[in-house]
Amino acid sequence: MAELQQLAQAVIQWSALFLLLALGIGLLSLLVMYLVDTHQTSHTIRRNYPIVGRFRYFFEHLGEFFRQYFFAMDREELPFNRAERSWVYRAAKNVDTTLAFGSTRALDHEGDVIFLNSPFPALEEDIAEPQPVTIGEGSCQQPYTTKSIINVSAMSYGAISKPAVEALSKGARKAGIWLNTGEGGLSPYHLEGGCDIVFQIGTAKYGVRNHDGELCDDKLRAIADRKQVRMFEIKMSQGAKPGKGGILPKEKVSNEIANIRGIPEGQASISPNGHTDVRNVGDLLDMIDHIRQVTGKPVGFKMVVGELSFFDDLFKEIHQRGNKSAPDFITIDSADGGTGAAPQPLLDYVGMPLQESLPLVVNMLHQYNLKERIKVIASGKMITPGRVAWALAVGADFITSARGFMFALGCIQALQCNKNTCPTGITTHKTDLQRGLVPAVKADRVANYAEKIVYGVGLIAHSCGVSQPRKLERKHVRVIQNSGQSVLLSEQHPIPETNTEYIAVTEVN
């Protein structure tokens, strides 16, 4: 008994000593912080309110997380709100995506769309599979035919992690859709799943460049020799940062990534703002023709729309050269597209959003009689069936999404893509954070998400009285105006008559 009492007293004494020591360290820390705060000159709040002022920066850091989980309503957040993200999560997990008690989406918000249900919706026996579309027919040796509607947009290995690329590749294969490599070159992980690949050639020409940074035909042929690589996309600009090249921080440029890209290890990967060998529409068509001749596969380009005169000049040049000189596809990116790292002035103020640019470019293709020759791929913030259905109705042949598939992988919109600290392992190369991303599991979620998008777009199409998604037209959509009333999309953006001058030129070509 005495021994237990002695032991208890010893524990109390040591606990008291520990508390005094902790208190002393705490007071000393506060004193150091006080002295630092009162003598530093960088932060006014900390200088005027030492110690207490530090909480401002702490709460400011936590603010975006608290807003996301506690304070923002379901439809308030940007770039994607909770309702949109929740739909993607449920779709990817293949759980019930139905809701009760009515929509939380405001039905009087200017610019939003309403699809017009038919009094005679498509019945079960009317429903058809999506129509296959061929890209590059008549212009290259190996055209590409696919039924896919939604595809994985450009995400480079380096910007996203090895397990993320593996999961996307395997999931794309299961869903029967393509995967765009992004401008960072072709990695073994893109090929691992066996899906169709679109190889993107960025302004730095990573993966197909020589020592001087110029396009290398031998490397182009080596990429094209892989059966999985079905098309080549020249990246002119990206919606989130038009006029600015790709940015990969040096922390992400490992030995493997450096070898794939053909750049030094451990140095920031900064692409030129534009292609140094493409300074006008003639140069662009020359590059497209050259890559098509070398690879034998369809070639197009991607850009966010800015000056519309570019398309006038491009389409006129195509007619002068002949239809075979045209790009096989154009990917139109939206100013509200995503990226791993971009300057805020470009994110906020430069480029046209897809809502405006897609109908304008599609109309110009009709005007110049090139809509059948040049396929249109729409990209940028389309992660739900409604947005995808709108793009198809406007005239897009395909849709690509990056952030939608990131959500399918488990992205929580932590907004840390540029910091190598992504908590879900998607945009980090830290192995301890990648551990949570299991490619075999996430691949199923990628496939589920793609299939749910197609299913959801089909629901809209069938409600509008058409048998499959690619039969949606502008007459099936109304756009809400400032007054809260709506107008037909076909009236807001009527498809123009083809210029007879270009009908004649096309027939001659």
Image (spheres, rainbow, N blue to C red):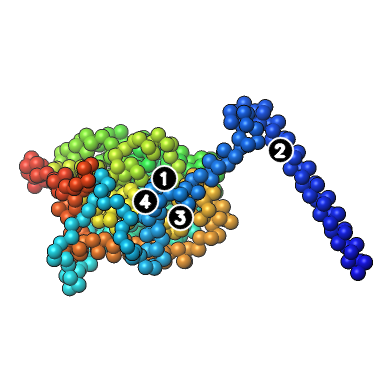
Which residue lies at the image location 16% right of the left edge and 66% below the top edge? 121
- Residue 473 vs residue 243: left or right? left
Q: Residues within 10 Å of mark 1 (few under 14, many from 20)?
A: many
Give residue 339's mark. Answer: 1
Distance Cα–Cα, label 1 vs label 2: 41 Å
Distance Cα–Cα, label 2 vs label 3: 38 Å
Distance Cα–Cα, label 3 vs label 4: 18 Å
Q: Which residue is mark 2?
A: 30
Where residue 244 sits in the image (x, y, percent)?
39, 36
Q: Nearer the viewer, mark 1 or mark 4?
A: 4
Q: Earlier in the sequence, mark 4 or mark 2?
A: 2
Helix, strand or loop at label 1? It is loop
Q: Amino acid at mark 1?
A: Thr
Where residue 266 sits in the image (x, y, percent)?
55, 43
Residue 147 or residue 421, whichever sits in front: 421
Helix, strand or loop at label 3? It is loop
Q: Which residue is mark 3?
A: 411
Q: Earlier in the sequence, mark 3 or mark 1?
A: 1
Q: Which residue is mark 4?
A: 75
Residue 336 or residue 162, whichever sits in front: 336
